[in-house]
Image: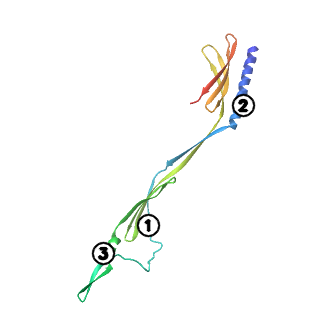
Amino acid sequence: MKITNKILIAALAILIAFAAGFFVGRGKIRTSVKTEYVKGETVTKTVYVPHPTIVYVPKEYVLPTKTDTIYVDNHPYPVQTVDTTKIIQEYITQNTYDFNAFDDENGKLDIKQMVQYNRLQKFDYTFTPIKTVITKTIKPVFVPFISASYNTFGVAGIGGGVFIKDVGIEYNYLYRPDDDKSGHMIGLKFKF
């Protein structure tokens, strides 16, 4: 009967410690937040180029000119005339614009355009999105645990304890049935 009372008292003490750790642990929590920027899949596409929505011809304009000479009564007079060759050359020239529209926390957008014959001929883009992933980890400050043990000396143990952050305190009631002896063990645990 003496042994049963000791086991009962030890079990009750462990149960009380476990319950206290459980309820205290629910009230206190640790929160850690981790933010990552993850690149998404790159999208490359050619956009159909529609006809212009607005066409505007200004009343006043500047054309490329060149210096020329006009002879009146065998006297040379320098004048500026419209350089038609230069206008045609600019009209048929193919201009390619390759630039970055933005590169920030939303992603990266590269644009490539081709202009020829006074019109946008081609519009390509490459977009790489970036997603912001926020991982929030909530851990209780107090984490209760129970334990049971048996060793080669024939000593059986039952106990429990609580982890406070990464340090644990443990209590075990030890009993050796061979010679009807019992004892107590207090331990310290560390989580890495």
Of the image marks 1 and 2, the number of the one nearer the N terminus: 2
Place of residue 106 in the rendered image (x, y in percent of width and height, measured from the top left): 51, 54
Within 10 angstroms of label 1, few (less than 14), some, or many (20 or more) residues?
few
In front here: 104 or 74? 74
Q: Nearer the viewer, residue 129 or 105?
A: 105
What residue is rendered at 61% in x and 16% in y? Answer: 151
Tell me if mark 3 has few (under 14), some (14-19) or many (20+) residues whose alpha carbon lies within 10 angstroms of its own: few
User: Mark 2 and mark 3: span between their CA atoms?
Assistant: 93 Å
Q: Which residue is mark 3?
A: 85
Mark sitting earlier along the chain (2/3): 2
**Residue type at numbered disc 3:** Thr
| Furthest residue toward top | 179
User: The disc labelled 2 sits on which kind of residue?
Assistant: Ala
Q: Say which element carries label 1.
A: loop
- Whether 178 is drawn above or below 147: the answer is above
State which tag comes first along the sequence, 1 or 3: 1
In the image, what residue type sits under mark 1?
A: Val
Horizontal relation, residue 57 to residue 150: left or right: left
Q: Which residue is mark 1?
A: 49
Of the numbered discs in the image, which one, if any, rests on residue 20? 2
Which label sits in the foreground, 1 or 2?
Answer: 2
Quarter occupied by residue 116? bottom left
* Inter-mark Cα distance, 1 to 2: 71 Å
Residue 84 point in image, percent of width and height: 32, 77
Tell me, for residue 6, which label it has, or none.
none
Label 2: how many Cα within 10 Å (few below 14, some 14–19, many 20+):
some
Marks 1 and 3 in Cβ contact (< 8 Å): no
- Quadrant, the N terminus: top right
What's the CA distance linking mark 1 and mark 3?
28 Å
Q: Are marks 1 and 2 in contact (CB under 8 Å)?
A: no
